[in-house]
Amino acid sequence: MAIENKAMLITYADSLGKNLSELEQVMDKYLAEAIGGIHLLPFFPSTGDRGFAPRDYTVVDESFGTWEEIEALGEKYYLMFDFMINHISRESIFFQDFKNKHEDSKYKEMFIRINQFFPENRPTEADIDLIYKRKDKAPFQAVHFADGSVEEVWNTFGEEQIDLDVTREVTKQFIRQTIQDMASHGCSIIRLDAFAYAIKKLDTNDFFVEPDIWELLAEVRQEAHKYQIELLPEIHEHYSIQFKIAQHDYFIYDFALPMLVLHGIYSGKSERLAAWLRKCPMKQFTTLDTHDGIGVVDAKDLLTDQELNYTSEKLYEVGANVKKIYSSASYNNLDIYQINSTYYSALGEQDDSYLLARALQIFAPGIPQIYYVGLLAGKNDIALLEATKEGRNINRHYYDLNEISTEVQRPVVQKLLKLLAFRNTHDAFDLNGTITVETPTDQKIEIIRQNRTQTQQVKLIADLSTREFMIYQNGQTLSI
């Protein structure tokens, strides 16, 4: 199924019900009008990072279900799959073959071998300091081979995830085959996870290395387009990088929106949010929440450093059960520029604030993505957080069918589902249409969306200080 201009759900295969079969039941019973697409977070056999250390892309983890169940979902909803183009599990057949056969392995060129990447007597401390990395130490791992030798390979994110050398033909063949396999199972769009780390080049910071990164994306897009698949490169960084990607006509993420909306609602001031909505591109997916934390760095320079600090501190003050320690090394937090919380809890679990945030999201340029916890206005899961000591698990609650049947009846959830159904069916949200954003006062924001022929119009009028908003469609008030 081709991408539709309808809201996309982000969910794990075992989080809205215990498997894919139950997920389909939930979708059909409660969410069919509110949701048009599903981003199925990694459902392949994996050895870590909640699926992001994939061992084998050719099969579905048997605890989740089967390809047939995924294909059944794909007949009703457009689907997004994750491709971790930067790395693969150390338990994959490719890396295991390399460990066992070393120089005789046909996959040896798939991996970045430190003794071959750096010249003799390197890397130096300066080389390691230059690398854009997620941890304090060098992103290298010592590997013990079956022949008794030991050497280091590159691993950006941890021991379970071994980086791939995307410049080698053996890796390119793996990429081509993976895209073909995903296409055969109903994938409409591939999310290129961690793609900005994929190019390693001597004497660079090994992050979003130009022009090489564009050559990689072009090769992947050429292959994906054979199967009418779109790409969504995933990157958490300064918004200017997202704009570069948009200029190359890829879908992008609006990862700046979460902090801008929080700042607007916390401060009651509209101008920073309005300025962003006037300039961000239409070909994008918007988010307020994802399976990771709330990104801070994404809004840098859209908010001043003082405003970013204000918003972060206010989150800890206003948010329900949001503590700084949950986003620290004590809770295995990899990214110091993210805050771990559900979006509902970040807004103090106040229904009016939360619905205003979602109304702003659906009026923003792009296609809204709604994380499954956010769709049910979920609170911070402190029990799961403490049981696992994993900071991001505060926003990764497991819902069973009974709990879902109760949660969907809450007024805040019913109103959110109605908002999303409205967004999915109104022509004014045309991605080739127009958006007009005004701030009649410091506290108020007015957003007008029109289709390309200007025959359909919707307007959002919101007061960020009182949390009140109204929606008008062709002059008539929409009751939410």
Image (cartoon, helix red, strand yellow):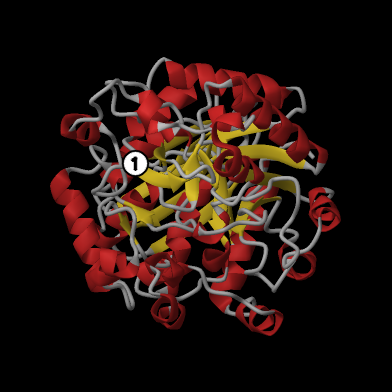
Q: Quadrant of residue 371?
A: bottom right
Inspect the image, locate mark 1, and give the three-letter code of the amino acid beneath it.
Ala
Which residue occupies 45% across, 31% down? Answer: 112
Q: Nearer the viewer, residue 162 or 432?
A: 162
Instruction: Classify 10 Å Cα crowding around label 1: few (below 14), some (14-19), many (20 and above).
Output: many
Which residue occupies 22% across, 31% down? Answer: 130
Q: Nearer the viewer, residue 276 or 292?
A: 292
Q: In the image, is residue 86 above or below residue 359?
A: above
Residue 96: % across, % down = 60, 46
Which residue occupies 40% across, 69% down? Answer: 390
Residue 425: % across, % down = 70, 48
Residue 357: % across, % down = 43, 58
* Quarter occupied by the C terminus: bottom right
Q: In the image, is residue 53 above or below residue 454?
A: below
Residue 178: % across, % down = 70, 36
What is the residue that sits farthest to the left in this orientation? 306
Q: Nearer the viewer, residue 190 or 124?
A: 124
Residue that carries the numbered disc 1 in the rendered image: 274
Decide if residue 71 is in sight here: yes
* Quarter occupied by the N terminus: top right
Q: In the image, is residue 28 above or below residue 234?
A: below
Secondary structure of the residue carrying tag 1 is helix
Which residue occupies 79% across, 42% down? Answer: 186
Decide if residue 248 is in sight here: no
Side of 479 where 38 appears, left or right: right
Q: Quadrant of residue 201?
A: top left
